[in-house]
């Protein structure tokens, strides 16, 4: 039977299938960070197990780290304790560790691809739902819980039933000011926050073929927000070009051997999907969310739908708008904002900073806006400076912070205050996600930049020269 | 992670008829700083359960005396979406719940529950509505969750529905086993497989 890309990668990692149960699924690459791994190490040690493949395991500190004064000791004792636990566990078990201050440190889903850990056809897990990011390379990558982190540390496998398969095709050309983030938010708004639950998604069509690797990462990153376990895109020349020569990619004969495998990674013509959806690129506008889940999004110029026009319970919908202090029929354009957050594993890469700068160059930050610009890694910082973007940012009245997850989930000090409205390039607008009582509008770096300079929600197309 | 075996559970239930309850609500990120698995019940639904001054919100179901001690939570559709944090499942368990019933669960949350001894029971939207109606009409409504027979029943009326669970996970829950026990038993098979990987 003809196979999909997902079938090929999945089936080649099944150690054995349990009768009427899950597959024993082999993991090539395991990322760990300070928040979801300490209890896994305690479990491992209490059972007397050891880390079976430390060379397949990679530790980075990101969720809890400050984004200023990283050279100083971490003030919050609980955060410091978690960072110490990660460092100590890594040292004890022979795992490479990129802690605070390491030149390779950054957000796990940014540093993985940057350093060539993420490879086509690989299976990648991490105790973080946005592990789906790595699917951009044709890998099967998904988030796991702490019990599973312990499983992978001690056996390099997890027990996982094979998800169903969905393909989402987007064809045509994207319009002015429409970015990969908008493509993803558009798809999620169509699918709702649970539309792909139980599925693994393959993204196909012109739009993804034309998209940069960074854009593909943004799209795959957000797969979890429609309930999918993950999303993936078939590797192509662009993929191979991106990974070639990175510090941990195969070299020489190993590269040639790997390439032979990677070139087989595509969906065959007659392969079947359990579900398939087609969208037209020209229908996609710059997007913005208005509610408290990522499925509650719309074109930035549209008005908030009425409860009668949305799926699901009206009570839940009204609770959501009530939390946001919005009403049915409201337009988002022109709403005054308090904060802008550029960063996260969704939009903390160099391309996102280039996009942001394309709008703020020669303009000034609005006085009513507090902006947190947080690169995804030190390598992104270096690139920002090398390309002269640092000066554009500073001249426009913004300040660049140090890398980390920051206000995406607000585990560190970067919390949006209660009631304040934030335009955020991150991935979740859940109640209190960016700080207790905070209100989040998810959007692209272009929408964030336009809103940061105007002080109100702004359609970036009005500031872009076509 | 050891947990008590799950066989048949009969209990009243907390109703939470809200859709898309994400794990950031079940346990907000700022309470994920522990390095040990202790006391996650304290911040279970923290921001929905408590006012900013720390006083309980009287109208939130988990705070209502009439439901106190229930071992089941009946939640709205798409329960447990969002973050993969297993802390959410720990907080469910630590709060004293052994079963969550919903018409749809997010995948990672469901998997985490099964790994920590909380049974996620997926029922039809119609049966979920029936459960909500019954609990709202009478908070003392008892629900029987029978894992061996994969059946959930409204005790008073006898109305019931079957639920799915794969037989491997069912055995684990019935015996209090987990996947690591299984995987450690086939270590040699795994290491032979690892040798065949191209990178």
Image (cartoon, rainbow, N blue to C red):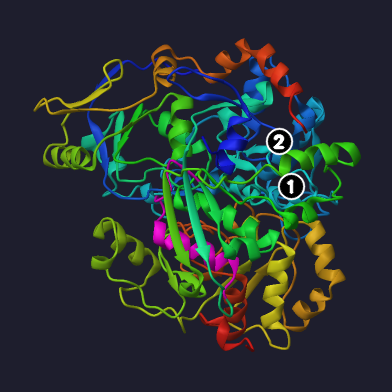
Total marks shown come to 2
Residue A41 image label: none
At 46% across and 56% down in the image, what residue appears? A430
Q: Identify the secondary structure beneath mark 1.
A: helix
Residue B111 rendering spot, x and y as whole percentages? 47, 32
**Front one among B79 and A397:** B79
Viewer can see residue A84: no
Can you give x and y, in whole percent of width and height, for residue A268 in the image? 57, 45
Under circle 2, the secondary element is: strand
Check contact, mark 1 vs mark 2: CB within 8 A. Answer: yes
Q: Is residue A154 left or right of residue B60?
A: right
Q: Is residue B176 above or below residue A356?
A: above
In what quadrant of the picture does the C terminus of chain A appear?
bottom right
Residue B145: x %, y % from top left: 26, 23
* Bounds of the magenta segment: A178-200
Q: Which residue is mark 2?
A: A29
Q: Is A191 contained in the magenta span?
A: yes
Packing grade of label 1 (10 A; few <14, some 14-19, many >=20) is: many
- Real-space Cα distance between discs 1 and 2? 10 Å
Q: Are marks 1 and 2 on the same chain?
A: yes
Marked residue chain, label 2: A
* Residue A323: quadrant of the picture: bottom left
Question: In which quarter of the view is residue B70 placed?
Answer: top left
Q: Position of residue A235 (x, y in %)?
A: 68, 50
Q: Residue at x 28, y 28 (%)?
A: B163
Q: Which residue is mark 1?
A: A112
The residue lying toward the viewer, choosing from B118 and A345, is A345
């Amino acid at each position: 039977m003809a196979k999909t890309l997902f079938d090929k990668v999945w089936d080649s990692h099944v150690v054995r299938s349990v009768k009427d149960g899950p597959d024993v699924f082999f993991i090539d690459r395991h990322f760990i960070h300070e928040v979801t791994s300490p209890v896994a190490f305690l479990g491992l040690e209490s059972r007397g197990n050891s880390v079976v493949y430390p060379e397949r395991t990679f530790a980075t500190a990101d969720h809890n780290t400050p984004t200023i004064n990283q050279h100083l000791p971490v003030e919050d004792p609980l955060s410091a304790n978690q960072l110490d636990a990660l460092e100590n566990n890594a040292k004890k078990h022979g795992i490479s560790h990129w802690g605070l201050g390491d030149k390779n440190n950054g957000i796990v889903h940014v540093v993985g691809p940057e350093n060539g850990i993420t490879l086509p056809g690989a299976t990648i897990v991490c105790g973080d739902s946005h592990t789906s990011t790595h699917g951009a390379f044709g890998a099967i990558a998904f988030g796991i819980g702490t019990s599973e982190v312990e499983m992978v540390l001690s056996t390099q496998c997890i027990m996982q039933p094979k998800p169903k398969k969905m393909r989402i095709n987007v064809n045509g050309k994207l319009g002015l000011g429409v970015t990969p983030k908008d493509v993803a938010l558009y798809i999620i708004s169509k699918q709702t926050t649970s539309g792909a639950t139980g599925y693994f998604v393959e993204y196909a069509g012109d739009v993804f073929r034309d998209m940069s690797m960074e854009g593909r990462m943004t799209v795959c990153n957000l797969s979890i927000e429609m309930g999918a376990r993950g999303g993936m895109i078939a590797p192509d020349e662009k993929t191979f070009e991106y990974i070639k020569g990175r510090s941990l990619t195969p070299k020489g004969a190993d590269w040639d051997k790997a390439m032979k495998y990677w070139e087989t990674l595509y969906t065959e013509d007659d392969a079947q999907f359990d579900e398939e959806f087609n969208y037209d690129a020209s229908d996609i506008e710059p997007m913005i969310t208005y509610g408290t889940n990522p499925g509650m999004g719309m074109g930035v110029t549209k008005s908030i739908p009425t409860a009668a026009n949305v799926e699901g319970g009206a009570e839940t919908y009204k609770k959501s708008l009530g939390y946001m202090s919005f009403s049915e029929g409201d337009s988002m354009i022109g709403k005054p904002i308090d904060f802008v957050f550029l960063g996260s594993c969704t939009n903390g890469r160099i391309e996102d900073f280039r996009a942001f700068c394309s709008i703020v160059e020669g303009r000034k930050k609005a006085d009513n806006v507090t902006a947190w610009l947080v690169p995804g890694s030190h390598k992104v910082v270096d690139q920002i400076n090398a390309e002269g973007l640092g000066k554009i940012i500073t001249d426009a009245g913004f300040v660049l912070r140090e890398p980390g997850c920051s206000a995406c989930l607000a585990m560190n000090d970067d919390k949006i205050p209660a009631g304040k409205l934030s335009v955020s390039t991150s991935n979740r607008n859940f109640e209190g996600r960016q700080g207790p009582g905070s209100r989040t509008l998810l959007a692209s770096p272009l929408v964030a930049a336009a809103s940061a300079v105007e002080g109100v929600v702004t359609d970036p197309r009005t500031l872009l020269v076509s | 992670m050891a947990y008590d075996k799950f066989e048949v559970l009969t209990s009243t239930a907390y109703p939470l008829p809200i859709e898309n309850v994400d794990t950031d609500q079940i346990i907000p990120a700022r309470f994920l700083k522990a390095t040990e698995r202790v006391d996650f019940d304290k911040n279970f639904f923290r921001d929905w359960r408590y006012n900013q001054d720390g006083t309980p919100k009287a109208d939130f179901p988990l705070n209502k005396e009439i439901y106190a001690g229930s071992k089941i939570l009946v939640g709205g559709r798409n329960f447990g979406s969002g973050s993969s944090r297993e802390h959410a499942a720990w907080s469910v368990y630590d709060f004293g719940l052994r079963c969550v019933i919903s018409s749809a669960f997010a995948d990672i949350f469901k998997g985490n529950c099964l790994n920590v001894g909380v049974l996620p029971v997926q029922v039809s939207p119609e049966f979920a509505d029936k459960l909500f109606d019954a609990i709202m009409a009478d908070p003392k409504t008892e629900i029987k969750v029978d894992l061996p027979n994969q059946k959930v029943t409204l005790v008073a009326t006898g109305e019931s529905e079957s639920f799915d669970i794969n037989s491997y996970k069912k055995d684990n829950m019935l015996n209090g086993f987990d996947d690591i026990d299984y995987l450690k038993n086939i270590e040699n098979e795994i290491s032979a497989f690892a040798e065949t990987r191209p990178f």
